[in-house]
Each structure stands twice: as structure tokens, then as C-alpha cells.
Image (spheres, rainbow, N blue to C red):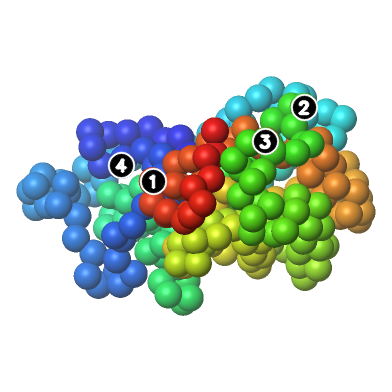
């Protein structure tokens, strides 16, 4: 997921966006790595060299998704909007030393604060969301998943066609700005399509995201104007990376037993 520069071991790279164990109460936060540094580590001088989140590049050239997502749109969406969330988060963290020890997924969970978001939540979640979104696409994407992922989708939705229709309907019916996700529900042990408003991310309630679609207008307006439906169909038919989704569900199976009969995902 996110890319950021490190000073010593202040931040760990957030390879698993569904990690557990972060507290939801800032009053009870403990930061052993920082406490071991001694009382002077969080001085104004020291805080200037602590870690910051960096802008992670999409895993392809900015023109690689054309004609379905233009270089011009990527330059605006990634280079301006996503960049703005990163810079905004870093400015907020300059004023809140206690949050430095958290991986990005932990930071999203902590600042969601059980549905009463802290000031850092919007920027933290949008950095996470955009990193995940870029990685959910690939040049020459779309089509159908294969092997165990397809079998799991058919098991949970009845057919791939049913899943696709449900995902598209959720994307078109989401009012205002937000995100549509394919997630693995931990307790139910099944796949589900969920939609969230604004920056809200399903890891806040412990779902495991597998793919996402940004439905904020700035995600498609330059290429599709007000035609969200055309954008959603382009994503499903030509952009979504089923290879990445497969890799994510393989990793998710380390946390969730999908039950019997055991469905291989690769």
C-alpha cells in the first residue's frame, strides 16, 4: 500500500490493510518505540525528522490506462487531488506526534474513532483509498476473474453476472461522493459489495477490501463529464485488475477461513 519515507523504525510499511489491534481511543494510545527514545525524543527539534507519508506512484505509466482513463485525468486526480491528501495529512501529523507510530491502515482505524472521526481521518483515509484504487487497475484489465476467485464470486453472488450488476448498481446509486468496494466480510466469511460516503473506508469496521472504485466526480469528470455509468462500465470492462484482486484474497485467506468446500484461489 502506501509509500513513505522512514526515520529509524517510527513507521512500518502497511502491507496488510486489514491488520488488527489498533486502539480506537486516543487517550489509551501507547507508542513503545517512541517511549524507548527517552523524554527528549518528541521535542520540537526532533519532531522535524520523524517520518512522513509520501505520494506513491500508480503501478503503471500515467498514460497506460488510455483510452479508458486519460493521462490528463491521472495528472489531475493523482498529481493534484491525491497529492493534496498526502500533504494535508503530513501537515496534520506535524501537530500530533502521538500518531507517528501507526501504519496507514492503523491510522485510518484510530482516527475513524468509532464513527466520530478525528481531524486526521479524512486525509489518512483518502491517501489509503487512492493508493488502493490505483493498484486495483491495470492496463488491459477488465474481463472476468479466473480459478478460485471466480468460484468464490459465483458462490457468494450466484454468478459473475450477478456480482457485476450489483457492483455497477451500487456505483450508480451512491449519492454524492464516495467509494464502492468488493470486500471480504470477516464474520460472515463471504464476499460483499459495499458503498461508503466521502472518505470512509471499510477497514474501519474490520472488513477486508479486495477492490475499489472511486465515485468522486473528480475521478471521471475530465474523461466522462457527468456520465458516471460510462466510467463505471469502463472500469469493470477494461480497467479492474483481477490479478491484484486474486492476490488480495489469497492474503485474506490467512485471516478468514472461507469454509467448505475449500475453494482454491490460485
Query: Residue 57: x and y, percent?
Result: 58, 30
Callouts 4 and 3 close, C-beta under 8 Å: no
Cα separation, mark 2 vs mark 3, equals 15 Å
Q: Which residue is mark 3?
A: 146
For the residue labelled by badge 2, is the local secondary structure a helix, a strand or a loop?
A: loop
Q: Residue furthest front?
A: 261
204 relative to 145 in the view: left or right: left
Q: Is residue 178 or residue 123 the one in the foreground?
A: 178
Q: Which mark is residue 11?
A: 4
In the picture, the quarter occupied by the C terminus is top right
Cα separation, mark 4 vs mark 1, equals 23 Å
Sequence-wise, the earlier of marks 4 and 3 is 4
For the residue labelled by badge 1, is the local secondary structure a helix, a strand or a loop?
A: loop
Q: Can you see residue 195?
A: yes
Instruction: Answer with the quarter of the image where residue 149 lies.
Output: top right
Q: Which mark is residue 10?
A: none
Sequence-wise, the earlier of marks 1 and 3 is 3
Sequence-wise, the earlier of marks 4 and 1 is 4
Q: Nearer the viewer, mark 1 or mark 2?
A: 1
Query: Residue 4: x and y, percent?
Result: 42, 36
Sequence-wise, the earlier of marks 2 and 3 is 2
Query: Residue 256: x and y, percent?
Result: 42, 54
Q: Is residue 146 or residue 34 the one in the foreground?
A: 146
Cα separation, mark 1 vs mark 2, equals 29 Å
Q: Which residue is mark 2?
A: 140
Instruction: Answer with the quarter of the image where residue 236 lies.
Output: top right
Cα separation, mark 2 vs mark 4, equals 34 Å
Q: Which residue is mark 1?
A: 254
Amino acid at each position: 500500500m502506501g509509500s513513505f519515507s522512514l526515520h529509524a523504525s517510527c513507521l512500518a510499511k502497511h502491507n496488510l490493510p486489514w491488520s488488527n489491534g489498533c486502539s480506537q481511543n486516543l487517550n489509551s494510545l501507547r507508542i513503545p518505540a517512541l517511549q524507548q527514545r527517552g523524554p527528549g525524543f518528541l521535542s520540537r527539534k526532533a519532531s522535524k525528522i520523524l517520518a512522513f507519508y509520501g505520494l506513491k506512484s500508480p503501478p503503471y505509466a500515467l498514460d497506460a490506462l488510455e483510452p479508458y482513463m486519460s493521462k490528463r485525468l491521472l495528472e489531475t486526480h493523482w498529481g493534484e487531488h491525491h497529492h493534496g491528501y498526502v500533504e494535508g495529512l503530513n501537515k496534520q501529523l506535524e501537530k500530533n506526534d502521538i500518531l507517528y507510530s501507526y501504519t496507514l491502515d492503523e491510522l485510518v482505524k484510530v482516527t475513524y474513532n468509532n464513527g466520530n472521526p478525528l481531524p486526521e481521518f479524512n486525509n489518512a483515509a483518502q491517501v489509503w483509498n487512492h493508493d488502493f484504487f490505483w493498484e486495483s487497475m491495470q492496463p488491459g484489465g477488465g474481463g472476468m476473474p479466473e480459478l478460485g476467485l471466480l468460484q468464490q464470486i459465483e458462490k457468494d453472488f450466484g454468478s459473475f453476472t450477478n456480482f457485476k450488476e450489483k457492483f455497477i448498481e451500487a456505483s450508480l446509486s451512491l449519492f454524492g461522493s464516495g467509494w464502492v468496494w468488493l470486500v471480504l466480510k470477516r464474520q460472515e466469511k463471504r464476499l460483499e459489495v459495499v458503498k461508503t460516503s466521502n472518505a470512509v473506508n471499510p477497514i474501519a469496521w474490520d472488513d477486508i477490501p479486495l477492490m475499489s472504485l472511486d465515485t468522486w466526480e473528480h475521478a471521471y469528470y475530465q474523461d466522462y463529464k457527468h456520465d458516471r455509468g460510462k466510467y463505471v462500465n469502463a472500469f469493470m470492462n477494461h480497467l479492474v485488475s483481477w490479478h491484484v484482486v486474486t492476490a488480495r484474497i489469497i492474503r485474506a485467506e490467512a485471516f478468514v477461513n472461507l469454509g467448505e468446500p475449500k475453494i482454491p484461489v490460485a
